[in-house]
Amino acid sequence: MNAPTPLHFLIVDPLPGVQAFARQLLEGYGFPADSIRCCSRPDEALALLPGFRPQFLICDWFPKEALSGIALHRQVCRQVPDCRLALLSFEAGPEQQAQAQAAGARFLLKKPFTAQELKSTLRQALEKLATERPELHQRLQQVMGSPQVMQRVSAPIPMPAMPQVPPLKPGDRVRLGSSTEVVDAVVIRQGELVVQLKNKNGLIPADKLQRA
């Protein structure tokens, strides 16, 4: 009998702390380190293919990238048709929920999330995956039923700090120093929240602005 196909995970998120935290959780469940890859951008994820064939993609929404998280999943599925998708996003309203559901995402977890929220959400996704892939069911049940594994996974893991979404949206009026400006776009850049102002060059850190 052939050995069960090992699960491979690809974590794509601009925040290094989220990458490290998700990897730590998966390794806590017994998945080997070489079955997990992490990167910060969709184009970096594509560069890993076809040498790395993930069965599970955990990905930021990447609303400002040329390739969104959902679009990245479509690209991955061209080479790995059974790749599952899970999404992380600062925006998780009805529109995002509908798009995630249409893409077949296992979950859409709103940022910023707590350590316990990611733990429980990921565990539920893995348990569901075990019921869909009979060849992996026994292995995952052994992994997730092991007292040693459950002790590792249940141990407190500090969640890395993530930036909070500012209460700003395009069209809002804000104060920058002594002047009043209008927000053109809110962007997450390398884990930092920055704002593009109308008729202004450059990006301004969100914490430098106040509502007008």
Image (cartoon, helix red, strand yellow):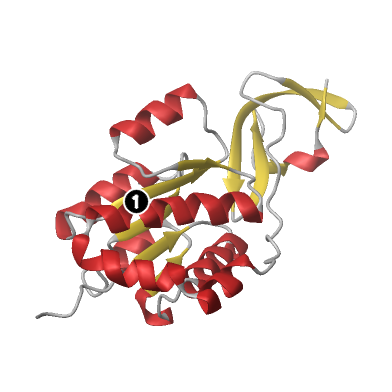
Query: Quarter of the image holding residue 105?
Result: top left
Picture layout, residue 184 above or below residue 133: above
Q: Quadrant of the C terminus?
A: top right
On the rendered image, what quadrant is the N terminus found in?
bottom left
Per the image, the residue denoted by label 1 is 128
Residue 73 in percent (x, y) is at 29, 49
Q: Position of residue 206 (x, y in %)?
A: 74, 40
Percent coordinates x, y for residue 71 in the rendering: 30, 44
Say if 92 sits above or below 161 in the image. Answer: above
Residue 179 horizontal side relative to residue 24, left or right: right
Residue displayed at 36% across by 56% down = 57
Residue shown at the point (58%, 60%) measured from the top left: 18
Q: Residues within 10 Å of mark 1 (few under 14, many from 20)?
A: few
* Position of 142 relative to 98 (above/below): below
Quarter of the figure with residue 211? top right
Coordinates of residue 192 in the picture (x, y in percent): 66, 50
Residue sticking out furthest to the left: 1
What element does badge 1 sit on? helix
- Say left or right for 177 vs 193: right
Q: Amino acid at mark 1?
A: Lys
Viewer-closest of 184 and 153: 153
> Height in image: 5 above or below 159?
below
**Which residue lies at the image location 43% right of the left edge and 43% below the top edge?**
107
Is any atom of residue 46 visible in this view?
A: yes
State which quadrant residue 209 falls in. top right
